[in-house]
Image: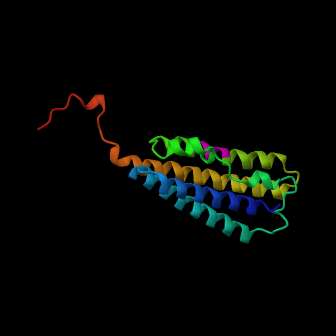
Amino acid sequence: MNIFDCAIKMEEEARINYEKLAAATPVSELKNLFTLLAAAEQEHHDALVEMKGSIDPQKAQFMDLQEAACIFQPLLAKRDLMAELREDPDAYKHVVKEEEKGVKFYEEQAAQAKDEGTREILLMIADEERKHLSIVENIYAFVESPKTYLAWGEFSNLKEY
């Protein structure tokens, strides 16, 4: 199976998942978060498509990769968890876990690869996943920033004028 086809398929499914969560949540903050995450997944998808175009297709073939491994099956797919995440302000933590699993998945596949070219491609995709994880963390910080304010104890001795 082509490694890039697997990665691209998982990104498409992740985007669809976030779009469903954005449509289902009544909380505007979570709607913004899931919408931004869906857009980030689309950007990641596009980056993988670009990478695929620049790599020799023969190097991207990985015989040990089963198609079943390429199905995006996050914790988000469980119905009870999806219902919970629609209104959970900490839904982001579940998203980060899923992104971390993605990095781990490609690193494990790279460790199993017998061909050096395939291993390099898998590690390249793992690096791309790490970049994507960083983007996801930044999206959360952006969405949460309106609620962040300076209220540290060390400033409690200052008088207001």
Question: Relative to residue 97, is residue 142 depicted above or below?
Answer: below
Residue 112 in percent (x, y) is at: 84, 47
Q: Is residue 155 left or right of residue 21?
A: left
Q: Is residue 26 left or right of residue 149?
A: right
How is the protein colored in the picture? rainbow
Q: Which residues are magenta?
A: 96-101
Q: Residue furthest left?
A: 161
Examine the structure image and report whether residue 98 is included in the region drawn in magenta: yes
Q: Is residue 34 left or right of residue 132?
A: left
Residue 45 in percent (x, y) is at: 63, 63
Q: Residue at point 62% right, 67% down? A: 46
Front in this rendered view, residue 160 or 98: 98
- Total number of numbered discs in the rendering: 0
Examine the structure image and report whether residue 133 is included in the region drawn in magenta: no
Q: Residue at point 60% right, 42% down? A: 97
Residue 71 in percent (x, y) is at: 72, 54
Q: Is residue 73 left or right of residue 21?
A: right
Q: Residue furthest bottom?
A: 53
Residue 85 in percent (x, y) is at: 51, 44
Would you identify the image quadrant in which residue 2 lies? bottom right
Question: Relative to residue 79, is residue 5 depicted above or below?
Answer: below
Q: Residue at point 53% right, 41% down? A: 93
The dominant secondary structure in magenta is helix
